[in-house]
Amino acid sequence: MHQEIGRKKKLFFYISVFIFLTSINNKSFLKKIDSVLKINNIEINGLSESENLKLSNKFRLLLFQNIFLVSNEIFKEILDENNLIQSFNIKKNYPNSILINIKKTNFLAITIFNNEKYIIGSNGRLIKYENIKEIKKELPYVFGKIDYSDFIIFKKIIDKSEFDYENISSFYYFPNKRWNIKTNDNFLIKLSDTSVLESLNIAKKIIDNKIFKNDNIIDLRISNYIITSNE
């Protein structure tokens, strides 16, 4: 009986030692895993070198954090603050790096807001003109107090029409939600506030027609009427 109790005590002792040693090994193992999973590189592509660097500096606070524990929402919050970004994709490359691919917004037009010059991006957001070092093409101006997302909608209608967006020098927006556009050839087109796509196509045909070569104002505001004049 005493021999059996002794064996049980020894067995309990060995089991206790085994559990203790296993726990130590588990902690050591977990530490090694955690060190492997710490973010040590965040690569950003899509913007200029200087713009990518600015974003990289903002992401420094995420370095050496566990890649599994860092939510994509944290990246999205930082990226959404940048008006140059149209869209982005965040990819976690396990065990320790993150790749962010960015699609840069297209520069559509220039506008004046609070006496400052801005560029309207295809994402509907304003970018300070002075922050842009290089603009590859001449952009039209947008005049009038508007929600810039409305301009994006109008731009999409132009793209669907036969009218060439590149041939527009300026846009004028009115409180009744109607647009005038002026072309590089000095044509002033007063569009309808309803049938915008149809008005644009009609204006294009009139401009191309030599009969109206002496008229530089095309008024399409009244339904079923075309008024041309020379100013």
Image (tube, rainbow, N blue to C red):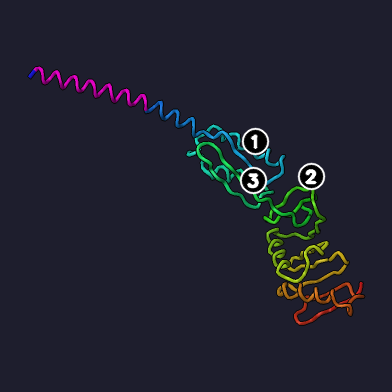
Identify the residue at horizontal 84%, vertical 66% (top origin): 183
Q: Is-magenta flag for residue 3?
A: yes
The one nearer the camera, 162 or 189, is: 162
Is residue 131 depicted above or below 147 in this figure? above
Which label was assigned to residue 133?
Answer: 2
**Range of residues picked out in magenta:** 2-25
**Can you give x and y, in whole percent of width and height, for residue 102 in the image?**
64, 48
Q: Nearer the viewer, mark 3 or mark 1?
A: 1
Residue situated furthest left in the rendering:
1
The earlier-in-sequence mark between 2 and 1 is 1
Give the residue number, with chain letter if any, for mark 3.
81
The amino acid on which the numbered mark 2 sits, given as a three-letter code, is: Lys
Identify the residue at horizontal 72%, vertical 54% (top origin): 106
Query: Could you tell me what secondary structure mostly forms the magenta stretch?
Result: helix
Give the residue number, with chain letter if any, for mark 1.
57
Q: Is-magenta flag for residue 231?
A: no
The amino acid on which the numbered mark 3 sits, given as a three-letter code, is: Glu
Give how far apart the Cα atoms at labels 2 and 1 are.
20 Å
Is residue 154 depicted above or below 99 in this figure? below
SS type, badge 3: loop
Give how far apart the Cα atoms at labels 3 and 2 are.
20 Å
Task: Say whether marks 3 and 2 touch (CB < 8 Å).
Answer: no
Quadrant containing the N terminus is top left
Is residue 114 depicted above or below 9 in this figure? below
Which label was assigned to residue 2?
Answer: none
**Can you give x and y, in whole percent of width and height, for residue 163 in the image?**
77, 69
The amino acid on which the numbered mark 1 sits, given as a three-letter code, is: Asn
Q: In which quarter of the image is residue 214?
A: bottom right
**Side (left or right) of 217 relative to 62:** right
**Numbered marks: total:** 3
Is residue 19 depicted above or below 221 in this figure? above
